[in-house]
Image: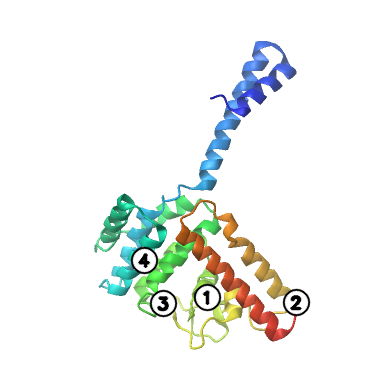
Amino acid sequence: MIGAGVLFGALAGLLLIHGWPGLLLGAAFGWIYDQARARARASVAAPAYGFVEPLFALLGAVAKADGRVSEAEIAVAERLMTRMGLNDALRRRAIARFNAGKQADFDVAPAIGDLKHWCGGRRHLAYPLLDVVADTVLAEGAPSPAKFRILRQLAWALRFSDFEIAMLLAAKGYVWGTGSTGPRQRPDDGAAPRRAPQGPDPYAVLGVPPDADAATVKRAYRKLISEHHPDRLGGLPEDLRRRAEERARDINAAYERIQAERGFR
C-alpha cells in the first residue's frame, strides 16, 4: 500500500518542480519519510516481549551469584512469568534462559547489552527492568556483594547512577552505604545494601537530603514523576506497567509525607 508520505511527497514535488522529475523525486523523499516513521513507531512500541530471554538469563545469573539458587529466588522468577502472562512458548524460553544464566561460565555482559538495546535509551522502559532484577537481588534479604555487583552493572549500562540505585533500594526499604545521610553520600564500592530499620526514607525515595528546601523537594518530585509516569509505557506487559505504577505511587507517597511533615504545598 502506498504510504501517505509517498503521496504527499509526489504531490509536493509535482507542484514545486513540475513534471515527472518532480513527481518521482517527491515520491522518493516521501518513501524515505514513511520508512523513517515506521522504524520510529517500531522503536517506540519496543517489541513487547523482546526483553524476556535476556532478562531471565540475568535473573538466573543473579540467583546463582552467591553459589546456590534458593527457593525464594525461583519463586520470584515464577511469579514474574505468571504476572507477565507469558504463553507456554515464552515460558519455556524464559525457563531455559534462567537455567542458562545459572551456569558457572555464563557471561552477563551480552544479556545486559541486549536489555540496553531493547530499552533504546528510554529510561521509562529501563526502570521496570532494573526493578525486576532488584527484586531477585533482594529475594533473600540483604544481598551478597556478588549479586549486587550484577545489579550495579545493569544499572550503569542503562545509565542509572549509584545515586539512583540507592534511591531504588530506599523505596524497597534498603540502605546502601555506611553514612546516615542517605544515598547522596558516596556508597562504599564493596558494600551491599542492608535493610533499613524503619522502612523507606521519603527523602531517599526522592533523592534529596533531609535539609533540602521546599523548592528542591518539589523539583525532584516533578522530575521523578515525569520520568516514571505509567502513561509513557505503551504496550508493555502488565507486570512491568504495574511496577511503574508502584514506583509512581512511592514517589507520590514520599512527597505527600514530606509535605505533611513540613507543612508546605
- In contact (CB < 8 Å): disc 2 and disc 3: no
The mark that comes first in sequence, 4 or 2, is: 4
Report if residue 115 is visible in the image: yes
Q: How far apart in space, not on screen, are marks 4 and 1 (Cα)?
A: 21 Å
Circle 4 is placed at which residue position?
79
Are circles 4 and 2 on residues that touch, CB within 8 Å? no
The residue mark sitting in front, 2 or 3, is 2
Extreme residue toward the top, this view: 19
Please identify, in this view, whether the residue under mark 2 or under mark 1 is nearer the observer: 2
Report the residue marked by disc 2. 265
Q: Earlier in the sequence, mark 2 or mark 1?
A: 1
Residue in view at x 53 percent, y 81 percent: 200
Classify 174 as above or below 99.
below
> Compared to 40, does 80 lie above or below?
below
Q: Nearer the viewer, mark 4 or mark 2?
A: 4
Where is residue 62 shown, x and y percent of the image? 34, 67
| Relative to 81, 172 lies left or right | right
Q: Secondary structure at mark 3?
A: loop
Q: Which mark is residue 190?
A: 3
Residue at screen point 43% across, 62% down? 154
Q: What residue is at 50 percent from the left and 59 percent from the top?
A: 126
Q: CA distance from mark 2 to mark 3?
A: 40 Å
Residue 55 horizontal/vertical position (percent): 38, 58
Observer-side mark, 4 or 3, equals: 4
Q: CA distance from mark 4 to mark 3?
A: 30 Å
Mark 3 and mark 4 in contact (Cβ < 8 Å)? no
Indicate which disc, 4 or 3, sits on the residue closer to the N terminus: 4
